[in-house]
Amino acid sequence: MRAMVKKSEPVLSQIARRVQELRSGRGLSQDEFARLVGCHRSQVSQVERGVKNLSVDTIDRFAKALGVDAVSLLQTGPVVARDPRKALSLRERVSRNVLALRSARGVAQDALSESAGLSRNYVSSLEVRKKNVALSHLEMLAIALGVPLSELLASPESDAAVGHH
């Protein structure tokens, strides 16, 4: 059974709580964790307070440093361990998932971008992995596609993958 996202809690708050929970559960200080992530302690602090909008690449780096799949940062309950054999970056997964969902619904890029309140160029760049997408924009795309945010982050092989509801 898949852990569910808390619907009432904003996504940044969910990620903040989960990063802090997983970091402290591993006995790491913010300084130690920042070194693992490759960032400054102040960025870890901002993420853990939920005050910093995150990019896909930043979420990927934090998840990698915690040894978990990025989807685990959006869920409660048991974590999904990061599988080092899966070579797809989070940016690649998001790109594939958005393209697959958009295509499955027969929606053109311009229609999706309009529905999400983003430029068509932005959606196009995302789909070819040129765009390090902000979490706030991913939320807008998930709403426009009618799926939970976690589905955009899901590994294609996972239970939460596109087309496996």
Image (spheres, helix red, strand yellow):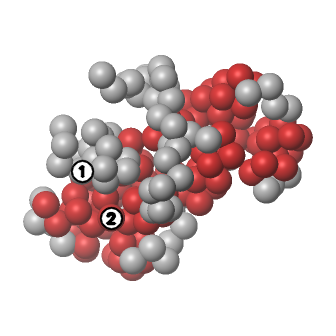
User: Residue 112's mark?
Assistant: none
Give the left or right position of residue 108, taking residue 113 as reference.
left
- Residue linked to disc 2: 96
Q: Quadrant of residue 26?
A: top right
SS at mark 2? helix
Image point (37%, 50%), residue name: 155
- Looking at the picture, how far across and down is residue 152, in whole percent? 36, 51
Task: State which quarter of the image contains the N terminus.
Answer: top left
Image point (17%, 48%), residue name: 163
Please tell me which residue lies in front, 74 or 138. 74
- Looking at the picture, how far across and down is residue 66, in whole percent? 66, 40
Give the left or right position of residue 40, taking residue 26 as reference.
right
Image point (30%, 41%), residue name: 160
For the residues labelled 1 and 2, the Cα–Cα distance comes to 9 Å
Does the image show residue 101?
Answer: yes
- Looking at the picture, how far across and down is residue 110, in whole percent? 25, 74
**Callout count:** 2
Give the left or right position of residue 99, taking residue 91 as reference.
left
- Residue linked to disc 1: 162
- Looking at the picture, how far across and down is residue 151, in whole percent? 33, 45
Rendered position, 18 above or below 161: above
Q: Label 2: few (<14), some or many (≥20) within 10 Å? A: many
Q: Label 1: few (<14), some or many (≥20) within 10 Å? A: many
Q: Quadrant of residue 149?
A: top left
Q: Amino acid at mark 2?
A: Arg
SS at mark 1? loop
Does the image show residue 122?
Answer: no
Q: Are marks 1 and 2 in contact (CB under 8 Å)?
A: yes
Please tell me which residue lies in front, 29 or 135. 29
Please tell me which residue lies in front, 110 or 84. 84
Q: Amino acid at mark 1?
A: Val
Residue extending farthest right? 31
